[in-house]
Amino acid sequence: MATALTLSIAALPALAQAEPPNEIVGTWRMVQATLDPGGENVLPYGRKPNSMLVFTPDMHFIEVLTNGDTPRFASDVRGEGTDEENRMAMAQSIAFFGTYSVDENGVFSGNRVEGATFPNWIGSTRTTEDLTLTVEGDRMFETFTRPEGTRIEIEWERVN
């Protein structure tokens, strides 16, 4: 009886369902981004982007995109920026979060935005028709086509 119980307990880890692969899980820092409105290559987050993207193992994500060259506000009190300061900060940054999915091979297959500094994105779902993430070693390449057709390409580097 003790031998059978020992064999049964030893077999339990083998019966446990293995976690599916997930090639995007982890923390990523932006290397560069280009926006292509009408054939132009614009740097939407400047020459020194200060941006991060995190994919958690429990299928949540958070993405914060900012221009590292955005000038500081004259006031150190949040909420007391001038119209011009606020407009520039909003135009050169966005943050959003939600859930994501991967296919059976661990490749990104879509996300759903649950919150964003741009409220129009809340509730939106993106599939690989408008958002692709391609991992090559410690680099990830993101291509996103906005609803109006503008395409943005971002290169990310895995943070170790």
Image (cartoon, helix red, strand yellow):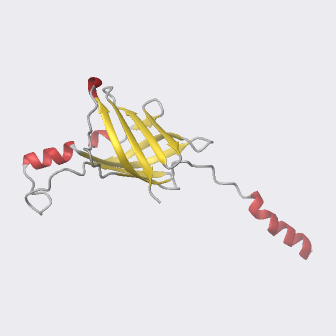
In the image, 158 versus 61, the foreground residue is 158
x then y, percent, for residue 85: 11, 49
Q: Residue furthest front?
A: 47
89 over 74 or under it: above or below:
above
Q: Residue furthest top?
A: 38
Q: In the image, what residue occupies the spot 8% across and 60% down?
A: 75
Q: Quadrant of the N terminus?
A: bottom right
**Residue 91 in which image quadrant:** top left
Q: In the image, what residue occupies the spot 11% across and 56% down?
A: 73
In the image, 2 versus 91, the foreground residue is 91
x then y, percent, for residue 19: 64, 54
Q: Is residue 108 left or right of residue 84?
A: right
Q: In the image, what residue occupies the spot 40% across and 42% down?
A: 155
**Residue 72 in which image quadrant:** bottom left
x then y, percent, for residue 78: 15, 60
x then y, percent, for residue 3: 91, 73
Q: Is residue 127 left or right of residue 118?
A: right
Number of disc labels? 0
88 over 6 or under it: above or below:
above
**Residue 87 in which image quadrant:** top left
In the image, 65 versus 139, the foreground residue is 139
In the image, 49 versus 17, the foreground residue is 49
